[in-house]
Amino acid sequence: MNTRVLPSSSLSILVLITLLVIPLTGEAQNRFDALRYNMVYPGQDAATMGAPSYTSPQDLGAVMYNPASTALFENSFFSFDLGTRQVREEGVYLGNRTDATATQTAITQAGFNFKAPTERGSLVFGLGYNQLADYNRAQSLWGYNPNNTITDLFLVDYEIDGYYGATAFNAWALDEFEENGDFFLESSWRPPFSTEFVGVDQYIDITERGHLGEYYLYGATEFQPGLFVGASIGIPSGRYHYDRIYEEQRPRDIENDYDIESILLEDRIRASVSGFTGRIGFIFRPTASLGIGMSAEIPGNLSIEEDFDTYIETTFEDLTTEADEFEGTISYDIRRPVRIGGGVTLSPVEGLELTGGGEWVDYSRIEFAGLDQSFSERELQRTENEAIRQEFTDVFNLHGSLAFNIGDAAKPRFGVAYYPSPVRGVSEQDRFFYSAGIGVRIGRNTMLDIGVQAANWKERVYDYQDIMGADLSGFFEEDLVIPDYTQNDIWRIHGMVGLTVGM
C-alpha cells in the first residue's frame, strides 16, 4: 500500500520547504523577487551601452552612473532612445532539449539636458527617464517524468495552509482517504489503493515580461576648476508580469489504472514597482586627458504591489472536471542595497577615450519590510531576510570601453562588462555583456546613435529541489521524491537606436 503521511514538523521547517520550491510554484515575496528588482544592466541608452563611464558622459544614461558627469555636456539637448531585446533560452529537461524565445520593444531613455549660461565653469540641470533592467524570459519544457509530480508539493503546501494546497484539494488534485478510521491526504496521482505511481507527462510554458526604470531630476556644476559635482533624485518605476501554464497528463504508452486524464495549473502574477532613490558624485580632471570619478547611490525603498491568481483543474477519465481558483493582492517593501561606483577615463591621444570602472553592490543588505499583517507573513519575512544575509553576497561589477572620434562625423564605441553572480557559490550565473555602437552626425546639432549588446549566462530556472543546499531527506516517512530541473543557457540581445538633438 503506497501511503505517505506527513509527520508533524515545525512551521519554520515547512515555510523553508515552501520557499525552496517557490521558483517552480510561482509564489512571490521571496528573496529571488527581491534580487530581480535590484539587478541593473549596463547601458541605458545606445551611446552609453557601448561606453559606460563614471567620468565621460555619452548621453543621459550617464546620470545612472555619476550625475556629476553631466556637467561635462557642452550644450543643451533633447535625447530619446528606443530599444528592442530578445531573450533565447536553451536547456534540457527530462532528457528533452528545450528552446524558447521572447521579444519586447520599449522606450529605454528620454530626457532633456539644460546647460545654463555661465561666464566660467559649467552649470547644468535636466530631467528624464532611463530603463535600468528588463525581465524578459521564456521557457517551454516537456517530458515524461517517472518519479515526480507537482501534486507532491501541493501536499506539502496544504500542511501549512497554503493557497496552492487548499486550491488543489478543492479541485481534487489532492484527495482524502481513510485507513483504519484515520483520514489522510494523498496526491490524486498516488491513490493508496491503486498500482504504484508510474509517472506523468509534463508540459510547462512560462513567460515573464516587464522592466524597471527610473524618472529623475539632476543638477551638476564645476565646483572649482577641474572639480565637478552633481546629484540626482529618482523615482524607480516598473512592472513585472509572470504567466505559467503547467499540465500533467496521464501517460498513454505505459500501463496504469489512473482515473485522471490531466491536472492543469495556471499561475499569473502582475506586479507594479515604485520607490525613491538618490545619487551624488564627483569628477576630478587634473588634465584634459585624465578624469577620475566616484558616485554613491543612496539606498532607498521599493514598494511592490502584486495581484496574483492560481487556477487548478482536474480532468477525469470520463472527461468530467473539478476546478478551483484563488486570487489575492499583497503589498510589501524592499530595502535596496548600497551601491558605490568609480572609474577612470584616459585620452592618450586626441579623440581617443579609454574608460574603466566598477561598482560595488552589497546584495546581502537587501531586506524585506512591510510583511507583518499575520504570523505567517512575519515568519516569511524573517526567514527570507535571514536567507538573504546568508546566501547573497557583495559583488564588484566591472566594465571597460573604448571610444574614438572619426573627425566630427562619427564616434564608434566598444565595451565589455562583467557582473558576477550575487548568489554565493553559483558562479555559473556570472553575466558577461559585450557591446558595440556608433554615433553618426546627421545634422549640425543632431546625432544618431546605434548600439547592440549581447549577454550570456547560465541559470537553473526550474527546480523543485533544495536549490540553496537544504537537506530535505527524512521529511517524509518514505524517501522524498524531488522533481528534476533544467539549467538553461540564456542569450540576451539588446539593440537600441537613439536620437540626440542639440539646442
Image: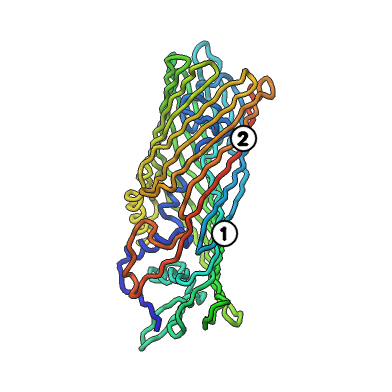
The image quadrant that residue 411 belongs to is top right
The relative height of residue 133 versus residue 323 in the rendered view (above or below) is: above
Mark 1: which secondary structure? strand
x, y percent for residue 428: 43, 48
Please, what is the three-letter code of the amino acid marked with disc 2?
A: Asp
- The residue under label 1 is 140
The relative height of residue 193 versus residue 413 in the rendered view (above or below) is: below
Q: Can residue 243 be spotted in the picture?
A: no
Q: CA distance from mark 2 to mark 1?
A: 31 Å
Mark 2: which secondary structure? strand
Residue 119, disc: none
Q: Residue at x 33, y 48 (%)?
A: 389
Q: Quadrant of the C terminus?
A: top right
Please, what is the three-letter code of the amino acid marked with disc 1?
A: Ser
Q: Residue at x 38, y 50 (%)?
A: 369
Tell us which disc is closer to us: 2 or 1: 1
x, y percent for residue 185: 41, 78
For disc 2, the neighbor class at 10 Å (few under 14, some 14 to 19, many from 20) is many
Closest to the observer, 301 or 171: 171
Q: Can residue 158 be spotted in the picture?
A: yes
Q: Earlier in the sequence, mark 2 or mark 1?
A: 2
* Number of marks in the rendered image: 2
Closest to the observer, 274 or 452: 452
Closest to the observer, 127 or 361: 361
Residue 81, disc: 2
Left or right: 254 in relation to 38: right
Q: Quadrant of the N terminus?
A: bottom left
For disc 1, the neighbor class at 10 Å (few under 14, some 14 to 19, many from 20) is many
Q: Residue at x 54, y 47 (%)?
A: 491
Q: Residue at x 39, y 48 (%)?
A: 423
The relative height of residue 151 versus residue 298 in the rendered view (above or below) is: below
